[in-house]
Image: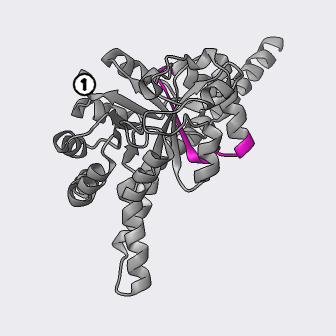
């Protein structure tokens, strides 16, 4: 009798675990496909376009959003004025809705936006951010006459009008904690795609922000293969200079329910190739070029890919 009760209890526990796992997988699948679903809705809206000024304007807006959904503006616009309000404003004026920020942290725990661990390239001052106070960092002047921005200043300026594609440049706990606290303070978890070269960082952030899309910045084929099996990785962005932007990798990501991304695409040839093989998103330093190609070439090419997929189904 005891053995039978034990067996029944074990079966009940196992069924409960299966049910919980199934619910998690279902919720995760819903979230992983958020980009594709949003695009499908926009495409449906465009397909219902009819005569009339209001409807035409709605369709134009939907088309613009569909085009923008593929393009991540790298550092706003990389170059002499990267990660400045000017760089972000130029990208937004071109039609971008996804703007990248790289995060570093000061010695007193303030998050600043800079790609490098030191201020040398942008300011000529070799100061290391993590060893400097926020006051020291704010006293610096960039070569373009600007300043190193706090992430909070970027949030204050653009609000929820854009999607922030934020990379944590460090995997230390202080940076992770500061990021989590600032996101909570602003309640911005719904307008951020967080990225890291460390899948461990993404795993930690999954606990705090399970619904925030997480992008793995991938530099190797082995890293790509491993990340396919990680449930907390939603987008895999590969380095084109290492030959990772391939049709087979794109198909593998999609087969595992993930979006496929690439970096950094600055020429017509690489952008057209990304569109051809079905890359979902990509980082670019030339936002106007990317958006132009998405409009002139991507709409038809991606629509054809969708139609072909539907035909197979």
Q: Residue at x 19, y 41 (%)?
A: 273
Q: Is residue 9 visible?
A: yes
Q: Which residues are magenta?
A: 185-198
Quarter residue 298 falls in: bottom left
Q: Residues within 10 Å of mark 1 (few under 14, many from 20)?
A: few
Q: Height in image: 238 above or below 270?
A: above
Quarter residue 56 falls in: bottom left
Q: Quadrant of the N terminus?
A: top right
Q: Residue at x 54, y 17 (%)?
A: 127
Q: Is residue 202 magenta?
A: no
Q: Nearer the viewer, residue 39 or 58?
A: 58
Q: Height in image: 140 above or below 35?
A: above
Spot occupied by residue 3 in the image (x, y as percentages of width and height) = 78, 12
Spot occupied by residue 148 in the image (x, y as percentages of width and height) = 55, 34
Q: Residue beneath label 1, please?
A: 241
Spot occupied by residue 247 in the image (x, y as percentages of width and height) = 22, 34
Residue that extends furthest to the bottom in the rendered view of this protein: 52
Spot occupied by residue 41 in the image (x, y as percentages of width and height) = 44, 62
Secondary-structure class at tag 1: helix
Report the colour scheme: one colour
Q: Nearer the viewer, residue 28 or 23?
A: 28
Q: Height in image: 201 above or below 36?
A: above
Residue that extends furthest to the left in the rendered view of this protein: 269
Q: Nearer the viewer, residue 66 or 232?
A: 66
Q: Is residue 15 visible?
A: no
Q: Is residue 197 magenta?
A: yes
Residue that extends furthest to the right in the rendered view of this protein: 2
Q: Is residue 70 left or right of residue 195?
A: left
């Amino acid at each position: 009798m005891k053995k039978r009760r034990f067996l029944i209890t074990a079966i009940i526990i196992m069924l409960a675990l299966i049910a919980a796992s199934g619910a998690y997988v279902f919720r995760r699948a819903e979230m992983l496909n958020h980009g594709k679903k949003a695009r499908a809705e926009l495409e449906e809206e465009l397909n219902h376009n009819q005569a009339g000024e209001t409807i035409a304007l709605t369709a134009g807006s939907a088309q613009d959003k569909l085009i923008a959904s593929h393009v991540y503006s790298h550092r706003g616009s990389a170059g002499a004025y990267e990660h400045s309000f000017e760089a972000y404003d130029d990208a937004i004026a071109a039609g971008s809705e996804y703007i990248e920020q790289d995060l570093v942290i000061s010695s007193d725990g303030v998050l600043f936006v800079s790609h490098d661990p030191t201020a040398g390239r942008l300011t000529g001052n070799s100061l290391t951010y993590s060893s400097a106070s926020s006051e020291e960092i704010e006293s610096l002047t960039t070569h373009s006459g600007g300043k190193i921005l706090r992430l909070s200043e970027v949030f204050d300026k653009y609000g929820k009008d854009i999607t922030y594609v934020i990379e944590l440049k460090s995997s230390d706990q202080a940076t992770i904690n500061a990021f989590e606290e600032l996101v909570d303070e602003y309640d911005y978890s719904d307008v951020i795609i967080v990225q890291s070269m460390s899948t461990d960082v993404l795993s930690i952030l999954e606990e705090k922000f399970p619904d925030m899309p997480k992008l793995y910045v991938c530099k190797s084929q082995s890293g790509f293969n491993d990340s396919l099996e990680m449930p907390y990785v939603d987008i895999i962005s590969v380095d084109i200079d290492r030959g990772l932007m391939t049709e087979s990798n794109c198909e593998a990501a999609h087969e595992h329910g993930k979006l496929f991304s690439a970096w950094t695409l600055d020429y017509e040839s690489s952008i057209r190739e990304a569109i051809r093989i079905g890359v979902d998103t990509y980082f670019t330093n030339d936002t106007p070029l990317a958006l132009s190609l998405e409009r002139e070439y991507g709409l038809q090419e991606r629509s054809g890919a969708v139609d072909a997929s539907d035909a197979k189904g």
